[in-house]
């Protein structure tokens, strides 16, 4: 995400079982502080596994402000120490997250609760201590430290084993040999963690995504682990893959690792490995303290030449098979260490096209990147279920990529993406320490390089990872770029590397970025179709836009009432110029809802109340997001200046937000979500706002033949004013398109506001795509002469207020549920417009709700927010984790633009 100025930056199919899981409740109405933290917090002692090659994560910590602890570091880090009055914290926990968890502070995501938290308590270091037991001390013991925000002194059993100058940087990785400090039985480790400032430390911040948490995420965000090994230790195990494209008939594997002798004697060890049925081994002699690289190549190990390899594909393009590398070092008949890595075989390329834009291919096939920018929880609270939900929702919307800007998730997230077939676009963050490389001190250069080395090592084997951006809004300095290049080369990084996500910010080391950015505020649908070929702001669907969106995103009424007080909700719709705490209050560009509300009121008519404002917002968000993705889809195969990728800013929000999100904190889905889902259908009929053409886009692998496009235009009273069919259409695969017809510019008796119904049928007459637009003969006009951050002004608005004249429509709903063996429940819903007149039911929404009328979430829909004419029916399905039903039979809550809200019980077989 990004602006060129840090001050105004951004001033932004049914789910496969096993991916959909429940979201842990984080927010809600304000809760009273729970019982005070116990005098001695309950923190489980970690039992370290004895087996060589094993890694055990610490289970949690007792934490306390250093200002409240008078005891010495030696005492605090010794077994038997009693942390009286301390707080319990999870294995991955920031300070503030722990204080929320134990009830010291109420729900941070409701109202302005975070503003009431005193910040001076986080201006001093905090202690994190934990106990672990070791049974067998004959093996060596290592403490692996990463994810510390921002730096820490480390003590084990009363001895300092590392200083904050050494353990600095959120993404650096450190192996501390603590064999000399560890004894049999109970052991203790303590971290004195330093305060964080994202502008000064190599950590993460939130720029203009949300308010900053009061502690600036000071604490631990990854696991701290204890590792056991013998005399010979393995590290840096990885696999380099090379696949023959375009045949995909063969592949070559290269296996690499480091072997280190931590004993005082010269040893000969046998390093053996397996990849499925493939086996290989080699003897290696190491002197005392010596480290040697070990490489098995296809030339010296012929079995690493694969015929008919299993190829990994992004979701929708093929399967996601994974291989497993297992290595073992055996000395004197005893295994001293082991290593395991999963990897996939695939080829990713991202060259610049003739227009200077990044173009992706996977395994030789062209691919339009359709992505969203993901955010972890604002407090960095890791929840595996929520992470899988985010990936699942992205897949459900038809997205194929997720961008991670500076918020690089824990290791298991990448495993999830590998299995789901979700491409990942990681990189460093904008507008803080990462982009001040011209001013780095020598030590900061070391931390910068070490961060790149550690991240490259973590990510390189994951087939879901496609690239890395070493800059966001800004490119790194020449010195930092070279540091990155050296670190990436040392890690055997083979994927594309981008100088930045800004076409104006390049480096000599990595060349042109090939990326565009912005806008980040509301734009009319027609904006996305304009190719202007100049500047960063004001561009529509051309090239690769790494971060752009329609700005504000108003959640459903259910979510709004969970996150804001009645007074705050009143201000939200009545005073759009007011600073909104749940947007980006620290941002000059994005702190209010004026851009969005001006467009809403001018196009749809002045909001008459909160419900009316939210109702219109859903329609506007569906319209805006659909247009954005559709424009990029249509222009993908253009001969001149085609689109190559788009990343919606953002996929989700780190907290309860009115800002940049396709779905909200509670996984409820607004018009933005379903607009994206509609636009990204694999076979899709769509309307072009710039030239009125009706286009069919085919994202399936093979071309599709024998299609018929049907176009109908209606006045708000339901009177049909235009009909035309285009028959025998053939559409190429892999994102190809065909223009079916162009709607005439002047149609007799067409109202200023009108509806367009587009349907696509196959050779048997079956409907395979349906798309309904609300349009106006009065066009939106964009003032490109005054383009600037965060958007381009709209100086004339389309007249869509005629939708307010739509008569009420009655929609009946019937639903049946079936429970499957995979732990999910499928609800099949049939919707019918039972009206006898001409009035369509516009944007009819279905929610699964419990008996108290609360949404059951997360849930994935095959389609939703559908529009039906009288007598028309459609069947959609919802998939939900059975456990989330809590034994209750769900109800269907049906509502819409002109459909009264009703509830219907779901039948069970």
Image (tube, rainbow, N blue to C red):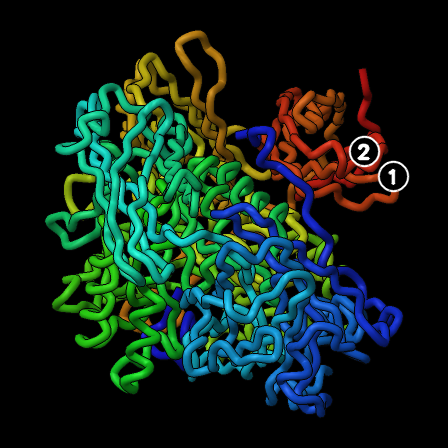
- At x 70%, y 80%, the residue is 64
Label 2 vs 1, first from the N-terminus: 1
Q: Which mark is residue 851?
A: 1
Q: Are marks 2 and 1 in contact (CB under 8 Å)?
A: yes
In the rendered image, the vertical position of residue 832 relative to residue 802, given as above or below: above
Residue 455 at x, y percent in the picture = 37, 59
- At x 64%, y 79%, the residue is 127
Return the residue nearer the eye: 216 or 799: 216
Which quarter of the figure is the C terminus placed in? top right
Q: Is residue 524 visible?
A: no
Helix, strand or loop under label 2: strand
Which quarter of the figure is the N terminus placed in? bottom left
Residue 892 at x, y percent in the picture = 77, 33
The reply, left or right, for residue 884 in relation to residue 267 is: right
Mark 2, residue position: 891
Residue 524 at x, y percent in the picture = 42, 56
Residue 846 at x, y percent in the picture = 69, 36
The reply, left or right, for residue 248 in relation to residue 517 is: left
Return the residue nearer the eye: 277 or 7: 277
The reply, left or right, for residue 674 in relation to residue 200 is: right
């Amino acid at each position: 995400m990004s602006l060129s100025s840090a001050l105004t930056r951004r001033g932004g199919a049914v789910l496969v079982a096993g991916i959909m899981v429940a979201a842990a409740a984080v927010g809600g109405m304000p809760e009273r502080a729970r019982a005070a933290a116990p005098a001695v917090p309950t923190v489980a002692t970690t039992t370290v596994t004895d087996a060589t090659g094993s890694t055990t994560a610490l289970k949690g910590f007792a934490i306390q402000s250093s200002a409240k602890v008078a005891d010495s570091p030696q005492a605090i880090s010794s077994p038997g120490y009693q942390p009286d009055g301390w707080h319990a914290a999870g294995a991955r926990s920031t300070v503030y997250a722990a204080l929320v968890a134990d009830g010291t502070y109420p729900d941070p995501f409701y109202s302005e609760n975070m503003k009431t938290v005193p910040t001076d308590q986080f201006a001093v270091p905090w202690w994190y201590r934990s106990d672990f037991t070791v049974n067998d001390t004959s093996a060596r013991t290592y403490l692996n430290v990463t994810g510390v925000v921002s730096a820490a002194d480390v003590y084990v059993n009363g001895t300092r084993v590392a200083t904050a100058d050494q353990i600095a940087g959120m993404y650096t990785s450190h192996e501390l040999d603590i064999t000399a400090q560890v004894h049999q039985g109970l052991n203790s480790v303590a971290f004195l963690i330093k305060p964080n400032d994202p502008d000064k430390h190599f950590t993460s911040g939130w720029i203009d995504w949300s308010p900053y948490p009061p502690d600036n995420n000071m604490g631990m965000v990854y696991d701290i682990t204890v590792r056991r090994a013998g005399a010979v230790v393995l590290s840096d195990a990885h696999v380099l893959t090379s696949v023959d494209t375009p045949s995909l008939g063969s592949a070559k594997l290269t296996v690499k690792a480091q072997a280190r002798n931590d004993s005082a004697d010269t040893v000969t060890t046998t390093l053996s490995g397996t990849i499925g049925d493939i086996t290989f081994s080699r003897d290696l002699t190491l002197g005392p303290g010596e480290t040697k690289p070990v490489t098995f190549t296809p030339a010296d190990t012929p079995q690493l030449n694969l015929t008919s390899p299993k190829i990994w594909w992004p979701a929708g393009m093929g399967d996601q098979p994974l291989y497993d590398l297992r290595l073992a070092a055996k000395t004197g008949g005893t295994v001293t260490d082991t290593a395991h890595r999963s990897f996939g075989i695939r080829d990713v390329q991202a060259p610049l096209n003739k227009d200077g834009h990044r173009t992706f291919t996977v395994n030789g096939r062209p691919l339009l990147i359709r992505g969203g920018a993901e955010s972890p929880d604002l407090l960095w609270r890791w929840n595996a279920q929520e992470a899988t939900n985010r990936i699942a929702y992205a897949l459900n919307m038809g997205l194929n990529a997720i961008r991670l800007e500076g918020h690089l998730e824990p290791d298991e997230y990448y495993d999830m993406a590998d299995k789901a077939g979700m491409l990942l676009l990681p990189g460093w963050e904008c507008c803080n320490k990462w982009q001040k490389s011209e001013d780095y001190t020598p030590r900061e250069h070391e931390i910068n390089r070490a961060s790149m080395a550690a991240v490259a090592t973590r990510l390189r084997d994951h087939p879901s990872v496609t690239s890395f951006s070493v800059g966001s809004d800004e490119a790194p300095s020449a010195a930092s770029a070279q540091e990155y290049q050296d670190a990436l080369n040392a890690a055997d990084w083979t994927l594309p590397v981008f100088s930045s996500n800004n076409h104006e910010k390049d480096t000599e080391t990595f060349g042109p970025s090939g990326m565009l950015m912005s806008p980040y505020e509301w734009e009319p649908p027609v904006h996305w179709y304009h190719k202007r070929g100049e500047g960063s702001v004001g561009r529509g669907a051309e090239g690769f836009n790494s971060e752009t969106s329609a700005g504000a995103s108003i959640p459903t009424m259910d979510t709004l009432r969970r996150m804001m007080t009645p007074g705050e909700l009143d201000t939200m719709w009545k005073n759009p110029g007011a600073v909104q705490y749940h947007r980006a209050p620290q941002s000059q560009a994005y702190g209010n809802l004026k851009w969005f509300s001006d467009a809403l009121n001018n196009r749809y008519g002045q909001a008459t109340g909160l419900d009316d404002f939210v109702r219109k917002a859903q329609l506007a968000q569906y319209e805006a997001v659909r247009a954005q993705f559709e424009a990029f889809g249509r222009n993908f195969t253009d001969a001149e200046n085609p689109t190559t990728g788009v990343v919606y800013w953002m996929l989700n929000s780190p907290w309860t937000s009115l800002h940049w999100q396709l779905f909200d904190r509670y996984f409820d889905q607004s018009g933005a979500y379903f607009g994206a889902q509609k636009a990204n259908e694999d076979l899709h009929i769509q309307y072009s706002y710039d030239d009125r053409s009706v286009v069919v886009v085919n994202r399936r692998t093979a071309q599709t033949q024998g299609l018929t496009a049907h176009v109908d235009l209606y006045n708000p009273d339901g009177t049909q004013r235009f009909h035309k069919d285009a028959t025998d259409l053939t559409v190429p695969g892999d994102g190809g398109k065909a223009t079916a017809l162009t709607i005439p510019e002047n149609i007799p008796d067409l109202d200023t506001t009108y509806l367009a119904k587009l349907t696509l049928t196959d050779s048997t007459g079956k409907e395979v795509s349906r798309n309904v637009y609300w349009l106006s003969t009065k066009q939106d006009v964009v003032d490109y002469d005054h383009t600037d951050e965060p958007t381009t002004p709209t100086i004339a608005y389309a007249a869509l207020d005629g939708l307010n004249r739509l008569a009420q429509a009655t929609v009946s709903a019937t639903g049946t549920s079936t429970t499957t063996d995979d732990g999910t429940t499928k609800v099949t819903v049939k919707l019918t417009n039972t009206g006898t007149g001409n009035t369509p039911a516009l944007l009819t929404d279905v929610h699964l709700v419990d008996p108290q009328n609360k949404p059951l979430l997360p849930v994935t829909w095959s389609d939703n927010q559908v529009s039906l004419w009288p007598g028309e029916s459609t069947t959609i399905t919802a998939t939900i984790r059975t456990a989330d039903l809590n034994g209750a039979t769900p109800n269907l809550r049906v509502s819409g633009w002109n459909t009264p809200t009703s509830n219907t019980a779901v039948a069970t077989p």
